[in-house]
Amino acid sequence: MKSSVLSPASFFDKVVIWLLVLSQILKTYGTVSYWNFASIPTYILGLVFLFLVISKKRTFRLGTSMPKECFIFFAYWAIVHILTNQGSVIPYNTIEAALMFVLFWGVVTYEQFPRLVKYYTWTAWVCIAFFAVQEITFRTSGIRISGIFSFLPIALNEVSDASSFIVNKMTSDRGASFFSEPAYLSQYLMPLLAISLFNKKDKKYILKSVIIVITIFLTASGTGIIAIGAVLAVYMLHLMTSKSIVSKLFVMFLFIGTFIFVPYFLNTEIGEKMLSRQSELSFEYDSGSRSGFMRLYRGLYVYDDYSVSEKIFGNDNNAAIKEHISHSVFAFTFADDNDTFFNGVQYTLLRTGLIGLLIMIMLHVRIFKQNNSCGRAILMGFVTLMFMEAVFFGNNMILYLIFAERFKNNAQLLEV
């Protein structure tokens, strides 16, 4: 996207947009996971933005700046928390999520959205380039550049020794660029694939799309591959419904190419690696923390232990949820008291019940309706991730939703 089309922006707005773009990487670093280098500035800048709105130096309107369903959901979530925790204060993570939504939706207006697209695409391609360097060094020397900044403190719960973590990244057979996990890289690149596919004004859009797909395949992330499958499905549907015969022929050749490529790919080293990780896509419990069973089903058994009222209204009490976990049929699949992994859909059901899930569905329907194909592709990719990953009100969730919503009726922004 050419800088000439960008609307003027204040230093504050530029910092906030960069924070949104880099937050998935920044959350790797900090003192503890709850206070990482993504959450701390989000809190500070969010409070500053609220002050500016209250002092009428900035405007923020529900339904325009941010979908009203977001406000309704946060208000309902706060009520559920207060009622299920005997009037205790709203937890920091809920407050952070609310501040994050208000801050990023408020700053990334339709006028500033092209700036977000520019910053994001530039960062994503830098990540892809560095990933390529990692792959080259690993395949030539057996050691890859970790991509982790060793001079910064690591803020990951699962990391007790930063030095060992970096060494493991250097010897791992799966690259992650600057991210802590390969899956995070593949998820981060999902909107870029949609933007590249639908950007017909870029003569190299097919080449760029192929590079992105190859990068995601090389991460060997099952969830990432399924997410880009959702994006590609929307893209092919878009081509099939177009009036262009060339587009229809392209889809036909794409199908033929896929049938030729997939068997060949599965016989390669990367393909064999993917097959060895097929438990990510399995519905059966295989005692692995990344099994498809844990991603897709485990939380539903906990939800099944809820009372009727809890199923409808939700329960935001951590102790109560852990009690339900202990009573569920598959309680043995939870490693310890701190193992509370649920995908986005299950998290919504457990915390806010059917009412909260209905509000979230209304939000997605609102974004999907009257949208262009690029926005719908990003949204469907995110919905796919919601069924597999813990992306509920995470840093990447707000990035996906803003991309999907701001592309609504704004196809001209695809001059990337």
Image (spheres, rainbow, N blue to C red):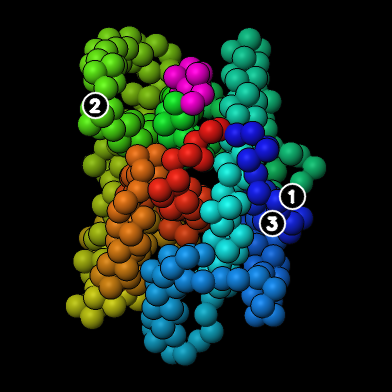
- Mark toward the start of the polypeptide (1 vs 2): 1
Residue 261 at what x, y percent from top left?
Answer: 32, 12
- Disc 3 residue type (three-letter): Asp
Identify the residue at image location x=41%, y=83%.
79
* Position of the C terminus by quadrant: top right
Residue 398 at what x, y percent from top left?
Answer: 50, 55
Q: What element carries label 2?
A: loop
Q: Name the residue under label 2.
A: 243
Q: What element carries label 1?
A: loop
The residues colored magenta run 201-210
330 or 80, nearer to the observer: 80
Residue 14: mark? none
Write down the quadrant of residue 304 in the picture. bottom left
Residue 213 on the magenta span: no
Residue 187 can be seen, yes or no:
yes
Residue 92 at what x, y percent from top left?
Answer: 58, 72
